[in-house]
């Protein structure tokens, strides 16, 4: 049994799987596929888990030199260098994910009354173009990260993100807005998001969930900060200079990310920079993607309609805003706590439990008591904590199914498929609302059922990889 990898109260089972008998266990280890098993006899890993070697302990916090052949076996698990990478990831995510909130604010700001030739309709088209292209590019950016590392990708993301805002500041026609926001900004977000997340996995294995959870709190922060900054700038300096000021802010943030984000493992120079369908043949990966799709689809609905739901129940605009703010603040806590818990009992176990909790919150609180102030507040807190991990636990779960040097390829494929499917969440929800004549009863039921399906799929995926080991940490 690897030193420091499991607690004394755990029982070792076959194939390197550890069963929980008290409070925590090491990550499950299993074979990713037959080809990897034959070529790497000393390893039987599920993603970022340590190989089953007699000396597979994490590297010291000082991150001292490690032989090249054993880099996959030793992780800093902390120290200044590792946490600076987490900080760089936070900054990159703050900018890349913040662009979605920027675009939403654009749509609210632009109207026929504004003294520019841009209209809300084309802005909506730019938002859809941004969402579609930035998600689709993830399946290419992941393999590029594995082959070349994060440096040039993060730099390209910086250039595209800043340039898009500068072009918007001088644009006066709809097509210019679409090119700047729908194309340039999507390229910037794609080049920033996946490499930043994947780089964290190079420095953490046993604490990967917590580190990723801390980094993804940038999602909640950007949802608050960017709209607030833009609203203030629009009033004081107008559209053009607001864009230039925002470009300067993004430039400062992403330049810092360029200096902080780095890969620890050597780039796989012989890796194919193009997507490959073989990742979906890896044991448990396709089921993991399905589980992530179900969970993300379900999380999109309350996040998108919580404000309008509150207004439909007679709450004031202030109460509606506060409910959304409570949900976002709770999701920040959920990302950190969910990531920490995943390090203890496994990301699939945590994802299944949180999906079940979200389903119970929908059926037990939102459906019967959502029309009361106390009910909707309690639901926002519980649902925010449960759904907040939907971003932070995806890379940790995927990391259990592949080697770290293929982390970008697997994560990019999973995130791309899951996010593209999630684009249909809003149109589907609109259809449900129309059929239900504006009532939210059916929408709440659909959300709860998707979470039930997600919880069941996470459990099924775990059992597919570990066998019938109910208490295995996975």
Image (cartoon, grey):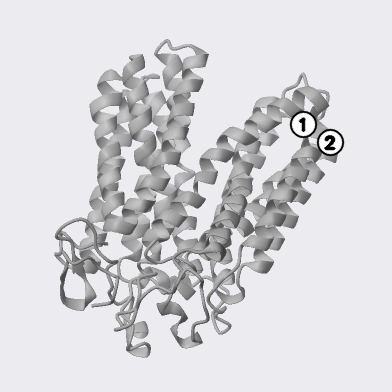
- Is residue 384 depicted above or below 413 in this figure? above
N-terminal-most mark, 2 or 1? 1
Along the viewing direction, whichever of 305 and 13 lies nearer the viewer: 13
Who's the residue at 79% across and 30% down the image? 239
State the CA–CA distance, disc 2 to disc 1: 7 Å
Quadrant hosting residue 33: bottom left
> In the picture provided, is 248 more to the left or to the right than 358?
right
SS at mark 1? loop
Instruction: Find disc 2 in the rendering and name its residue.
Output: 172
Quarter of the image with the C terminus is bottom left
SS at mark 2? loop
Where's residue 52, x and y in %?
A: 29, 80
Instruction: Find disc 1 in the rendering and name its residue.
Output: 118
Where's residue 258, x and y in %?
A: 68, 61
Along the viewing direction, whichever of 293 and 459 lies nearer the viewer: 459
Classify 10 Å Cα crowding around label 1: few (below 14), some (14-19), many (20 and above).
Answer: some
């Amino acid at each position: 049994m690897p030193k420091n990898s499991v607690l004394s109260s755990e029982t070792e089972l076959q194939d390197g799987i550890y069963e929980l008998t008290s409070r925590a266990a090491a990550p499950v280890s299993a074979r990713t596929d037959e080809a990897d098993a034959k070529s790497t006899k000393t390893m039987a890993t599920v993603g970022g888990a340590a190989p089953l070697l007699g000396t597979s302990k994490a590297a010291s916090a000082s991150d001292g030199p490690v032989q090249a052949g054993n880099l996959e076996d030793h992780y800093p698990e902390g120290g200044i260098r590792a946490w600076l990478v987490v900080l760089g990831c936070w900054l990159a995510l703050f900018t890349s994910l913040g662009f979605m909130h920027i675009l939403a604010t654009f749509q609210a700001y632009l109207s026929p009354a504004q003294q520019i030739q841009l209209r809300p309709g084309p802005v909506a088209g730019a938002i859809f173009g941004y969402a579609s292209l930035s998600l689709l590019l993830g399946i290419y950016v992941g393999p590029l990260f594995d082959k070349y590392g994060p440096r040039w990708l993060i730099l390209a993301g910086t250039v595209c993100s800043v340039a898009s805002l500068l072009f918007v500041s001088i644009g006066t026609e709809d097509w210019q807005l679409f090119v700047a926001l729908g194309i340039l900004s999507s390229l910037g977000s794609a080049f920033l998001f996946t490499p930043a997340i994947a780089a964290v996995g190079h420095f953490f294995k046993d604490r990967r969930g917590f580190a990723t959870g801390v980094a993804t709190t940038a999602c909640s922060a950007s949802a608050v900060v960017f709209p607030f900054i833009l609203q203030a700038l629009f009033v004081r300096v107008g559209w053009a200079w607001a864009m230039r000021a925002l470009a300067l802010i993004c430039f400062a943030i992403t330049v810092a990310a360029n200096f902080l984000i780095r890969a620890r493992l050597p780039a796989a120079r012989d890796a194919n920079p193009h997507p490959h369908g073989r990742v979906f043949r890896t044991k448990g990966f396709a089921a993991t993607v399905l589980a992530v799709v179900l969970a993300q689809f379900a999380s999109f609905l309350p996040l998108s309609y919580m404000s309008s739901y509150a207004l439909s129940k007679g709450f004031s605009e202030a109460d509606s805003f506060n409910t959304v703010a409570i949900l976002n603040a709770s999701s920040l806590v959920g990302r950190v706590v969910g990531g920490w818990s995943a390090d203890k009992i496994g990301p699939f176990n945590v994802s299944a439990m949180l999906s079940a909790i979200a389903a119970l919150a929908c059926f037990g609180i939102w459906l019967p008591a959502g029309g009361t102030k106390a009910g909707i507040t309690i639901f926002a807190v519980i649902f925010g904590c449960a759904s907040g991990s939907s971003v932070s636990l995806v890379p940790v779960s995927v990391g259990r199914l592949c080697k770290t040097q293929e982390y970008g390829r697997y994560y990019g494929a999973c995130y791309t498929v899951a996010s593209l499917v999630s684009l249909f969440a809003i149109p589907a929800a609109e259809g449900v609302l129309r059929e239900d004549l504006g009532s939210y009863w059916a929408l709440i039921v659909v959300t709860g059922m998707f979470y039930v399906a997600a919880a069941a799929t996470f459990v099924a995926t775990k059992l597919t990889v570990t066998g019938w080991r109910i208490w295995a940490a996975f």
